[in-house]
Image (cartoon, rainbow, N blue to C red):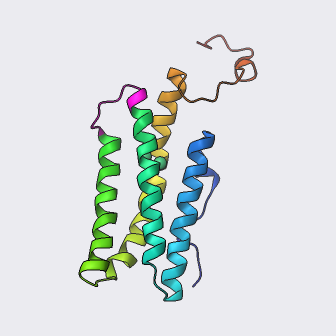
């Protein structure tokens, strides 16, 4: 029963080094939290670590959104806010109400939510930054465009 909550696969790679590193860390922290749950040990510290990392992860993306001219509140940032609300509620249930059941539920929810979010919202953000030249990964474009007439 020691399956990882979420496997890191090529499908999650968005070809943006900083974001890919952050996403890989997210998956590792989610799996460490899941492992603590599976082991029957106190999973709250690992979950708090995941929450702190996720706050920074989302703030980083929202900084990029601002630089790319997104509205301050948009579909992507709303999803972030919703997820952080749920995660903070899970901590509150565990600490104030001594109810740890939500910790188990949120593990599955996050493992299902993350790939869809990365492949849709985060991939679109990376594409937008790339189009605006904001991805910080300026590379010679010759290889990709040789022989192509529409290399604008
Ligand atoms: Fe992300
Ligand atoms: Fe995101």
Residue 110 colored in magenta in the image: no
Q: Quick check: can you spot residue 30?
A: yes
Residue 67 colored in magenta in the image: yes
Q: Is residue 2 above or below residue 19?
A: below
Q: Nearer the viewer, residue 48 or 79?
A: 48
Q: Quadrant location of the N terminus?
A: bottom right
Where does residue 69 sit, x and y in percent of width and height?
37, 25
Q: Is residue 38 left or right of residue 21?
A: left
Q: Quadrant location of the C terminus?
A: top right
Q: Is residue 93 left or right of residue 69?
A: left
Q: Is residue 115 above or below residue 138?
A: below
Count every numbered label the image shows and give the total. 0
Name the residue at 44% across, 41% down. 61
Name the residue at 25% across, 79% down. 96
Q: Quick check: can you spot residue 6?
A: no
Magenta-colored segment: predominant secondary structure: loop
**Magenta stretch?**
66-74
Outermost left residue: 97
Outermost bottom residue: 40
Where does residue 21 sit, x and y in percent of width and height?
61, 50
Name the residue at 62% across, 14% down. 151
């Amino acid at each position: 029963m020691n399956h990882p909550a979420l496997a890191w696969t090529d499908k999650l790679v968005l070809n943006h080094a900083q974001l890919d590193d952050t996403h890989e860390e997210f998956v590792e922290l989610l799996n460490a939290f899941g492992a603590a749950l599976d082991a029957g040990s106190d999973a709250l510290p690992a979950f708090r670590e995941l929450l702190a990392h996720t706050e920074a992860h989302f703030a980083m993306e929202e900084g990029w959104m601002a630089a790319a001219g997104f509205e301050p509140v948009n579909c992507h940032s709303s999803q972030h806010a919703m997820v952080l609300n749920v995660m903070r509620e899970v901590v509150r249930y565990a600490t104030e109400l001594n109810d740890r059941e939500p910790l188990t539920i949120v593990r599955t929810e996050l493992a299902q939510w993350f790939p869809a979010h990365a492949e849709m919202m985060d991939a679109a953000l990376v594409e937008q930054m790339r189009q605006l030249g904001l991805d910080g990964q300026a590379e010679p474009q010759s290889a990709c465009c040789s022989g192509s007439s529409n290399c604008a």
